[in-house]
Image: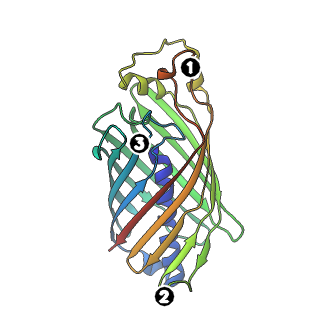
């Protein structure tokens, strides 16, 4: 999604905040009700390296509520801009989920996202109506191991995804007074099916693909969809946090239609960055 990558960065940030709470106080004391708000920017919107023809950028205000029980609700508001469109509201992502209790070696969450897109012809993932999944991390001193699975829902289509990755957390506590700086180099592999491709092109007004076309058969196959490396840098000071994350994504197994670039997935190796500032109360 534009939001698979953006969400991974958000989860890294949340994981770091939980870690900081754990090292600074009793873990039981860190469990509390919490309100959060942030503003996030992504230089190039993409979905597993798939981009729109105008290579739009995006702004994402996010508000969230988390219960001390682990249940949480988030709303992400999507604004995009490109050479043809000024900054415009495009949709909202509503997320509800549960974060597993913090422990030294394990963290994770289960979630459901509901997508409310105003213009379904703009974003590559706009055919999706919802997504349910689980993210897990095994934390250790050598390298953290991340595994996630998801189910995506679109018109008469269901897709399955698998995410695997490695990351290493480096903490710096003496650079800024009363603040923690973290660098988190990460590498991910995204796999799955992408039957929603059929509805992406329908939403774009390009018509339906033949039901027996090679492209649709390709979309049904479970295969590697993208590789991505990133290096998020996160600053936490009191109730405030900020991050910047340069990243490089390499899309794989793009669906193509012979002689019809308009009906094919657009994508190539892409460098982009995300950045954001937020507060927790």
**Numbered marks: total:** 3
Quadrant of the rendering where the C terminus is positioned: bottom left
- Per the image, the residue denoted by label 1 is 215
Residue 56 numbered mark, or none? 3
Which picture quadrant has residue 213?
Answer: top right
| Residue 15 drawn above or below residue 86 | below
- Residue at horizontal 35 percent and vertical 30 percent from the top: 121
The residue closer to the viewer here, 175 or 101, is 175
> Is any part of residue 224 visible from this angle?
no
- Per the image, the residue denoted by label 2 is 177
Horizontal and vertical percent for residue 131? 43, 42
- Residue at horizontal 51 percent and vertical 43 percent from the top: 150
**How far is disc 2 from disc 1 in space, using C-alphas?**
55 Å
- Crowding at label 3, few (<14), some or many (≥20) Cα neighbours within 10 Å? many
| Residue 105 drawn above or below residue 180 | above
Question: SS for tag 1?
Answer: helix
Sequence-earlier tag: 2 or 1: 2
The reply to whether discs 3 and 1 touch (Cβ–Cβ < 8 Å) is no
Question: SS for tag 3?
Answer: loop
Taking the image as shown, residue 200 lies to the left or right of residue 146, namely left
Sequence-earlier tag: 3 or 2: 3
> Is any part of residue 257 visible from this angle?
yes
Q: Nearer the viewer, mark 3 or mark 1?
A: 3
**How far is disc 3 from disc 1 in space, using C-alphas?**
25 Å
Horizontal and vertical percent for residue 148? 57, 49
Sequence-earlier tag: 3 or 1: 3
């Amino acid at each position: 999604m534009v939001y698979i990558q953006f969400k991974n960065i958000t989860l890294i940030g949340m994981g770091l905040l939980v870690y900081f709470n754990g090292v600074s106080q009793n873990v039981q004391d860190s469990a509390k009700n919490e309100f959060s708000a942030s503003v996030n920017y992504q230089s190039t919107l993409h979905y597993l390296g798939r981009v729109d023809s105008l290579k739009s950028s995006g702004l994402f205000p996010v508000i969230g509520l988390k219960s001390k029980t682990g249940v949480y609700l988030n709303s992400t508001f999507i604004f995009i801009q490109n050479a043809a469109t000024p900054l415009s509201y495009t949709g909202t992502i509503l997320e509800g989920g549960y974060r597993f209790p913090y422990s030294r070696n394990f963290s994770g969450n289960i979630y459901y996202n509901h997508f409310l897109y105003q213009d379904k012809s703009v974003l590559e993932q706009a055919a999706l109506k919802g997504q349910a999944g689980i993210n897990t991390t095994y934390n250790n001193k050598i390298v953290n191991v991340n595994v996630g699975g998801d189910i995506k829902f679109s018109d008469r289509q269901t897709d399955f995804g698998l995410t695997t990755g490695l990351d290493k957390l480096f903490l710096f506590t003496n650079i800024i007074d009363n603040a923690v700086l973290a660098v988190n180099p990460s590498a991910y592999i995204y796999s799955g099916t992408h039957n929603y491709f059929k509805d992406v092109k329908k939403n774009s007004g390009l018509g339906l693909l033949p039901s027996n076309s090679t492209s649709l058969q390709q979309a049904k196959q479970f295969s590697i969809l993208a590789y991505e490396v990133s290096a998020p840098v996160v600053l936490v000071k009191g109730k405030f946090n900020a991050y910047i994350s340069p990243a490089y994504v390499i899309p794989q197994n793009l669906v193509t239609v012979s002689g019809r670039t308009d009906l094919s997935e657009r994508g190539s190796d892409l460098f982009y960055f995300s950045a954001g500032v937020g507060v927790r109360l």
